[in-house]
Image (spheres, rainbow, N blue to C red):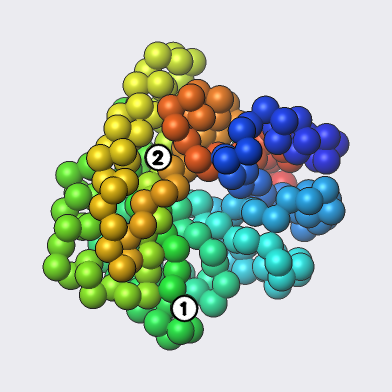
């Protein structure tokens, strides 16, 4: 039961850690069930799917885009998205700013850091993140607010490696945490999924993105 799974996870995470229920590929009825159990923060990784679900579900839901983002899709969610986790280029940040401006909004973003050893996971190096947030051009983006960082560890059983990767992001996060600008207020560290969220919380995560432990395994073929 989704309700029981949610309760179990909530009991296992500290109060200051936000739970994002990752509902990608799941039907609207499943999201409604989680909503009825009190869940208000949902994460999706495809813009079109998130828009369809946004249209169908109650409007007090906070929608988080957690997947790799194509710049030409930003416009479809700019009027309602509450947090974009996977920002991995300056160009994308500029596009989000442009679309947010059209709707007279400020969109909260997390910069995605590449911490895994796999080449396939998207993300910026710590140097690239520093370069972006310290650039002159960044200061002009008044319709975005960079509220923290996001990262994904390598998919492995090696807990030592996962911890090292999460710790490296925690260290970098701590190094920029006291930097504040009009559009930079780093307070969120989004790390941890179903398989590794306990380790992530030990390493300072303030936001976990959990899908299969709540909704069951995903079947991409259905
Ligand atoms: C799918 C996904 C998750 C959730 O994964 P689970 O293992 O099902 O908890 C978390 N973060 C991102 C970026 C994802 O794409």
Badge 1 residue CB within 8 Å of ligand 1: no
Horizontal arrangement in the rendering, residue 46 relative to residue 168 (left or right): right
In this view, 116 is above or below 89:
above
Residue lying farthest front?
A: 178
Q: Can you say which quadrant of the picture contains the N terminus?
A: top right
Give me the residue at 22% from left, 67% from top. 138
Residue 166: in sight, yes or no? Answer: yes
Secondary structure of the residue carrying tag 2 is strand
Q: Secondary structure at mark 1?
A: loop
Q: Is residue 81 left or right of residue 13?
A: left
Q: Which mark is residue 151?
A: 2
Mark sitting earlier along the chain (1/2):
1
What residue is rendered at 43% in x and 43% in y? Answer: 189
Q: CA distance from mark 1 to mark 2?
A: 25 Å
Q: Position of residue 45 (x, y in %)?
A: 54, 53
- Using the rendered view, name the quadrant where residue 12 is placed: top right
- Using the image, determine if residue 221 lies above or below residue 27: above
**How many numbered marks are there?**
2
Contact (Cβ within 8 Å) of mark 1 with mark 2 = no
Q: Quick one: label 1, few (<14), some, or many (20+) residues within 10 Å?
A: some
Residue visible at 73% across and 50% down in the picture: 39
Task: Residue under label 1, please give it.
Answer: 105
How many C-alpha atoms fall within 10 Å of the one at disc 2: few (<14), some, or many (≥20)?
many
Give x and y (percent) for residue 5: 77, 34
Please determine whether, in this image, residue 105 is positioned above or below residue 21. Answer: below
1 or 2: mark nearer the eye: 1
């Amino acid at each position: 039961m989704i309700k029981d799974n949610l309760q179990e996870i909530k009991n296992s995470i500290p109060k200051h850690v936000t739970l994002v229920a990752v509902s990608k590929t799941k039907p609207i009825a499943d999201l409604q069930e989680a909503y009825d159990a009190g869940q208000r923060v949902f994460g999706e990784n495809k813009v079109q799917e998130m828009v369809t679900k946004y249209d169908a579900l109650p409007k007090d839901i906070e929608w988080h885009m957690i997947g790799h983002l194509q710049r030409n899709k930003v416009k479809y969610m700019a009027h309602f998205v509450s947090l974009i986790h996977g920002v991995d280029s300056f160009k994308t940040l500029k596009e989000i700013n442009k679309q947010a401006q059209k709707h007279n909004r400020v969109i909260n973003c997390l910069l995605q850091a590449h911490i895994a050893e796999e080449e396939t996971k998207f993300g910026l190096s710590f140097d690239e993140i520093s370069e972006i947030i310290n650039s002159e051009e960044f200061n002009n983006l008044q319709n975005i607010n960079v509220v923290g960082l996001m990262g994904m560890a390598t998919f492995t059983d090696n807990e030592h490696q996962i911890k090292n990767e999460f710790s490296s992001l925690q260290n970098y996060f701590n190094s920029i945490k006291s930097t504040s600008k009009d559009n930079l207020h780093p307070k969120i560290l989004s790390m941890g999924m179903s398989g590794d969220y306990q380790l992530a919380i030990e390493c300072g995560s303030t936001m976990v993105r959990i899908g299969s432990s709540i909704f069951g395994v995903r079947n991409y073929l259905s």
